[in-house]
Image (tube, coloured by chain):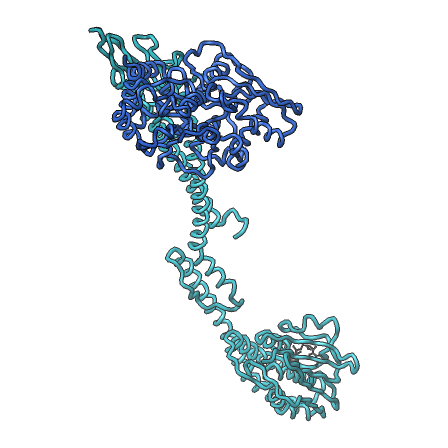
Amino acid sequence: MNGSTLSIRRRLVIQLALVAALLSVAFFLTVRGVAGNATEQTQDNILAASATSIADALYSDNGSVRVEIPYSALSMLGTVSEDRVFYHVILDGKTLTGYDDLPVPEGQSRPGVPLFDTYSYRGDSLRAVVVTRTLAAANQPRRVEVVVAQTRLGLAAISSRITTTATAIGVAFFLVATALSALAAQNALRPLSRLAEAMARRGPKDLRPVSAEAPSELAPLVGGLNSFMSRLSAALGRSEDLIVEAAHRVRTPLATVRTQAEVVHLQMEKPQNRQALRQMIRAIDESSRSAGQLLDHAMVTLRSDHLETEIVNPADLLREVVDRLGPTADLRDISIRLDLPDQPLRVRGDPILLQNAVRNILDNAIKYSPAETDIAISLSGDDICRMTFCDQGRGFEAADIARLPDRFSRGTNVGDVVGSGLGLTIVTDVARAHGGSLEIATDPKGGGACVTLVLPCC
Amino acid sequence: MRYACFALLLTWWAGSSAAFDIEESHSYPAGASELRILSTADQAVFDPILRSFQAENPEISIVYDVAGSTGVMAAIQDEGALYDLVISSAMDLQTKLANDGLAQAYLSEATARLPAWASWRDMVFAFTQEPAVLVVNDRLFRDLETPRNRAGLIELLRGNPQVFRGRIGTYDVRRSGLGYLFATQDSRNTESYWRLTEVMGRLETQLYCCSGEMITDVASGDLALAYNVLGSYARVRLKDTPGIRVVEMEDFVSVMLRSALIPMNARAVEEAGLMIDFLAGMSNRPELVQATGLPPVSLDARDGDESVLRPIRLGPGLLVFLDRMRRETFLRSWVSSVEQE
Ligand SMILES: Nc1ncnc2c1ncn2[C@@H]1O[C@H](COP(=O)(O)OP(=O)(O)OP(=O)(O)O)[C@@H](O)[C@H]1O
Ligand SMILES: [Mg+2]
């Protein structure tokens, strides 16, 4: 999943993070805008209240207009922030009291409606309001403007606080949202990765249908996969069947042909005819052997796929096989020595497969040894169980060893010994199915072959 | 008397266009850097503070000039006199300097420890809190009940005109900036202020420029009582002046905050800051408090609003009574109440 531009998760996370970033920025702008407006509005309201309360304190005294600025008019401006405060009361364009150079906010001012402006005065930016009143003094209408202004440091402080808070919340929101979207993406893709894992865990020959639960989006994929695998396994099964069938069908008539050939051989007088028949018989033997071994191999493959194991004592196994092949060895005066440990060993496995493997090894040892020799079989081990078969025959050609376990691969040392080249293939397959291995070596002392079947004990 | 001139310095600011006069000038030569202070407080009061400060900062020479509060205002506002620190009891004028952009901001650990009400705009820093009190003649009041609040005072004066006629003292608010500050705060805080003024006027109240003279006259028996005397000053006098008693009103007590600020054109800003830190930490120096008689701003004090003691609030509210028209109106009412004949 890493690095690939096609990673669904990465694309999902990036898209969700982009959305979160957009929302964060929108949130930030909204909060700052709304809060900024609100604080400005608050300052305007206080300014207007202040100017109005000054205007309310206007009175005419003996025909002259006077004002008694209420304490609260200015002190209220000092309650929220420590901003500078200026005021200016103007009567018919002439200063009545206050800061006489404080400008009047520009604009169309109507009586009773406060008019706001922002300007610079004495080196600071001011928010100012003017409230206009008309007053009758000495029977004359007099126009009074009350200007109140305040610096905006408190406002700036509040707005920077709001900005900081909004930024912090925006960033936090973005981080949380991104983390959550990463989680969500992972969650959404979990069935997919579970499926991928299940597929990866499978052995090369496991063609069972996928049983893991898949979300509806994956159902077509899983369905396709399953039907593909069932077709594949059916095809494999058919070819396996075909081999078994074919081997079986070939073996029986071959036996008949061989008997007939031997009968004929006895009756032949011309040496070249006898030679031809011997070759024929040998070919029949090889075919028959091949068919048998193919059959066995097919059986091994089948059972390995669905290994049914039980506890097996390898000593018993060896004894059984030696009993079985004893007569063949006796025919050639080969004596078999069994060297078994006192302690019983335990191996978990399929007894039929194990027997088949051991039989093939011993069969080779007998087959490739000259008459009147010994075969030494030894069993050892505690964690790992080793069955070693050493004979006094021709040994292996070093160049052959690597390829001997291959199918139909025979050594250059076989001479006229009949064989199909499947024996060690069967042994290797069985060993692998049980988590073990096969070791092939030429005995450095005697020059014979030493074949060891290694299996894990339990 | 050590403090004899103290209150003299709180002279009236009304004749403000007059050029400012330095009443006293003292110098404390020491190291290379020079700190120029313009203050309304008598050098005798400040001497222990200056010496103690110099002991801690031996590299700083000090020039200590004394002027009235009006003079201080004129010096900084109109004449651009070169000072590094302005110390004044005129809270309203200090506030106006800061509001009009003639002071510079200063921040330090020491100023951050001050309670919120003791500083404004990080420019004006209060370092004392000095209440306005009633000073009475002890002998005369042996037979009279001591008033506990202003209503009680009005009743007492009304009930005993023969005792009090011509024997009441208070500030002439036309001449004394501090008197004006206390009077305007009174008028804001209680309904009975104008009634009290009226009663005092009817009893031919004597008007003074300064707390010192009032106390002297109360002690001598010329006055039966003096209203709105600077408490810090009266308490110092208690020790060596027999026959006077200090009474704090129970309805409310206006508390003046003596404050310091650094003018815009100050040169030795750093040294001025050191002095502000020193003054802000006065509550940790009981020996200086003892020597000067100046009650320091206590660092753990809450806002005075909840108690009887009401520190006059620094801030734009103080500009109201500096308003030309408002002042005119106030003085007109006051004069008509006090001078009735
Ligand atoms: N004990 C042995 N001594 C010498 N060579 C051996 C021995 N066992 C196996 N080989 C060599 O390994 C080769 C492969 O053995 P494998 O059993 O697979 O085939 P095979 O014996 O030729 O045929 P079959 O399938 O009939 O057993 C043999 O052809 C032979 O060359
Ligand atoms: Mg073989």
> In the figure, is residue A442 to the left or right of A53?
right
- Residue A183's place in the image compared with B241, above or below, is below
Among all residues in the image, which is located at the extreme left?
A: A139
Res A389 quadrant in image = bottom right
Query: Residue B319 in the image: x percent, y percent?
Result: 38, 21
The residue shown at (60%, 87%) is A317
Foreground residue, A458 or B22?
A: B22
* Left or right of B200, for residue A123: right
Indicate the colour of chain A: cyan
B285 is higher (above) or lower (below) than B103: below
Query: Does B175 sit above or below residue A203?
Result: above
Q: Give the tally of numbered discs.
A: 0
- In the picture, residue B204 is in which quadrant? top left
Examine the rendering and report whether any part of residue A154 can be seen. no
Residue A240, horizontal then vertical, whole percent: 51, 73
Q: Nearer the viewer, residue A456 or A135?
A: A135
Task: Locate the C terminus of chain A and report the quarter of the image it occupies.
Answer: bottom right
Color of chain B here? blue
Residue A430: x %, y % from top left: 59, 77
B190 or B290, nearer to the observer = B290
- The answer to whether residue B4 is visible is yes
In this picture, is A238 found above or below A33?
below
Quadrant position of ligand 2: bottom right
